Image (cartoon, rainbow, N blue to C red):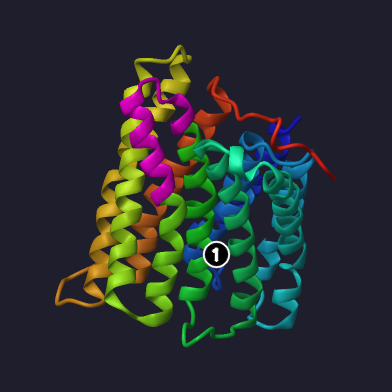
Amino acid sequence: MTGLPVAVGAVVWGGVVATFAAGKASRLTWIDVLLLFGALVIVPLAATAAPWRDRAVEACVGSALLLVPSLALARGPAAAALTAPWVVTAAVVAWTALRPMWGERRGLDAGQVADGAAAGWFVVAAASLPVSRMGWSVLGLEEPIIELTSVHYTFAGVATSLIAAMAWRRASSRAAKHVATVGVALVVGAPPVVATGFFTNAALPQVGGAVLLTVGVYAIAFVLLTSVRDRDDDGLAKALLVVAALSIVAPMVLAVGWAAAQHMRLRALSIPDMARIHGTMNALGWSLCGLAARTRTKCTPDRRVFVDSV
């Protein structure tokens, strides 16, 4: 039954895209469209693939539906209030996923750490949204960076962490396992480094964080590609893995280039263009295909650690 809520989210997002394409949603930007894709499709799909609590998929879709009118309204208390169920859902998911991990923290493997990180990044993504809908600035950061924080932690945080966990479990050789472990460490640890760069406007964490994340994602993509021949998956799963691994190459080059251009005399895409190119390829190629592959592969997390405790 978890497929039905994801399908509902996808249909609603399709309606948003159609309205946007027809020019009937004057308040929406492509960043808003990507944010809704993350909330309506990627996070529910993540809840299907991840060892989160029962009914998490339904809760994610139900609370995400309220984000559509939130983004249709002008920034202010009403728009922010509609994000409250989304924040609560993220908090409950994170609590029920991370609380059992605390007692098992010394025995966790890299895959479990990545699964737990995904739940934590869900909270960061959700908590950024009411701040954005209120139109507040944080430590000098203003829109669209606040909203992009929510978008970034949905795709580079939630989705990428779960894909990294899948890659670690699929690694069939010692060398591949080492590469996957490095990849997990980088994709889990790099987002806070990138955030530090934005808050401080310092080149080292902003550019360095983008480089670290890129290396980590490339490591995960490499393991996914090499695992296709070593695993007995169906044809669709293999195709999804290949598309995910290949589709992330160009977007990460753009990400490093954009970060470097903030501190050097380099040409880079504008933020709207980055959203259309980098963001769309990341969302549809890497995140969607990667998570869809995870739901179809035979690599499943150890549910002895992730138990439904509420």
* Magenta region, residue range: 167-186
Q: Position of residue 191 (x, y in %)?
A: 44, 60
Residue 204 vs residue 102: left or right?
left
What residue type is disc 1 on?
A: Ser
* Residue with the most extreme left position: 265
Camera-side residue of 209 and 32? 209
9, 172: nearer the viewer: 172
Left or right: where 125 falls relative to 167: right
Q: Is residue 178 magenta?
A: yes
Q: Main secondary structure of the magenta part?
A: helix
User: For the point 32% across and 55% down, which residue is it?
Assistant: 212
Instruction: Residue 225: tell me if it is visible.
Output: no
State the residue at coordinates (28%, 72%).
Answer: 204
Q: Which residue is mark 1?
A: 150
Which residue is pictured at 57% across the width and 49% down the height? 118
Q: Is residue 15 above or below residue 55?
A: below
